[in-house]
Image (cartoon, rainbow, N blue to C red):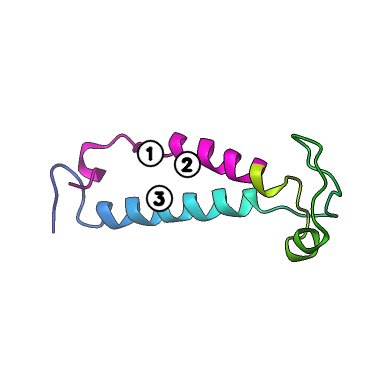
Amino acid sequence: MAVGWSRDEGVQEQIDATVESAVQLAKSRLPDGESLTHCEECEDAIPEARQKAIAGVRYCVRCQSELEKKLKTAELYNRRGSKDSQLK
């Protein structure tokens, strides 16, 4: 099925590229290494259970939640900018 001026497989390629981009972004955000005992942001103690549950944890729950809120608001637009890629 052709959409606008794109090739028939163009839409699927764009979907695949968007999914791949999201997967790479998620992988880049995964912590690794040794967990910290105190939050990088506020320096509060990170509970031992959190340190064990998430390898490489760097933030307390409160600071991690704030960070995720900021990141989420920055992702609410279509980075590709193509008229054909915008869902209605």
Density class for disc 2 (Cα within 10 Å; few <14, some 14-19, many ≥20) is: few
Q: Which residues are magenta?
A: 63-88
Which residue is disc 1 drawn over? 76
Q: Residue at x 84, y 44 (%)?
A: 38
- The answer to whether 47 appears left or right of 24 in the picture is right
- Is the residue 37 above or below the residue 53 in the image? above
Q: Amino acid at mark 3?
A: Thr
Three-letter amino acid code at the position of disc 1: Leu
Measured Cα–Cα span from mark 1 to mark 2: 7 Å
Element type at mark 1: loop
Q: Residue at x 38, y 57 (%)?
A: 16
Query: In the rendered image, which residue does mark 2 sit on?
Result: 72
Q: Residue at x 46, y 34 (%)?
A: 74
Q: Is residue 67 left or right of residue 53?
A: left
Left or right, 2 with reference to 76: left
Query: Three-letter amino acid code at disc 2?
Result: Lys
The image's mark for residue 18 is 3
